[in-house]
Amino acid sequence: MAGDTEPGSDSFDRCSTEPAFGYELKAIVDRDGNEHEPGGGGVDMVSLELPIKNVIQNTRLRHDLAQGEIFRNRRTGVGTHSPETVARGFVNNGITDPNVADRLLIVDDYHVSNPEMDRDEPRPCMLPPDKR
């Protein structure tokens, strides 16, 4: 759920004071080892970062391609016009850090390599992080 609507709920009976199955919940221990009391009154909400979306939003993949440009994964050599395809390739290879992905991202520009075309250099938004 998006977290902006409240789902309907079924009614239930809290009359029973005996724990079900002969045991009762004493504490909730999260992944980091922190202990929480049960029955705190709700669910903790955390933001969800999807790795592919995170790579797209925080690298040059977020920019629209101009005519003659193509995204390429330096590691695999795969080139495509689809930012999702390149981001998925990075994530599937264990690269989820946008800084690392941006270093491995190449934006080939046909207009820059072809002297007959009108652009003399790549657009600044498509330059690698170390050349900006």
Image (cartoon, grey):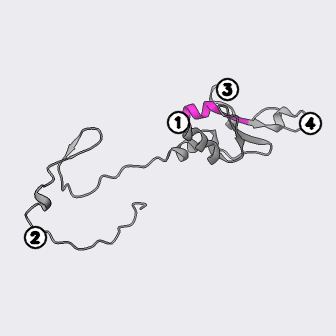
Q: Local crowd at mark 1 within 10 Å, few (<14), some, or many (≥20)?
A: few
Picture quadrant where residue 100 is located: top right
Q: Quick one: SS at disc 4?
A: loop
Q: Local crowd at mark 4 within 10 Å, few (<14), some, or many (≥20)?
A: few
Q: Considering only vertical position in the picture, is 37 above or below 126?
A: below
Q: Which mark is residue 94?
A: 1
Circle 2: residue type: Cys
Q: Which mark is residue 15?
A: 2
User: Who comes first in sequence, dot 4 or dot 1?
Assistant: 1
User: Who comes first in sequence, dot 4 or dot 3?
Assistant: 4
User: How much space separates mark 2 and mark 1, taking CA atoms?
Assistant: 50 Å
Residue under the image location 28 percent in, 55 percent down? 43
Q: What residue is shown with label 4? A: 116
Circle 1: residue type: Gly
User: How much space separates mark 4 and mark 3, taking CA atoms?
Assistant: 25 Å
Quarter in which the C terminus is drawn: top right
**Which circle, 3 or 2, is nearer the viewer?**
2
User: Who comes first in sequence, dot 3 or dot 2?
Assistant: 2
Quarter in which the N terminus is drawn: bottom left
User: How much space separates mark 3 and mark 2, taking CA atoms?
Assistant: 68 Å
**Which circle, 3 or 1, is nearer the viewer?**
1
Q: What residue is shown with label 3? A: 131
Q: Quick one: SS at disc 3?
A: helix
Residue at the far top: name it. 130
Residue under the image location 88 percent in, 38 percent down? 117
Q: Quick one: SS at disc 1?
A: loop
Which residues are drawn in magenta? 97-107
- Left or right of 21, for residue 62: right
Q: Local crowd at mark 3 within 10 Å, few (<14), some, or many (≥20)?
A: few
- Left or right of 77, for residue 98: left
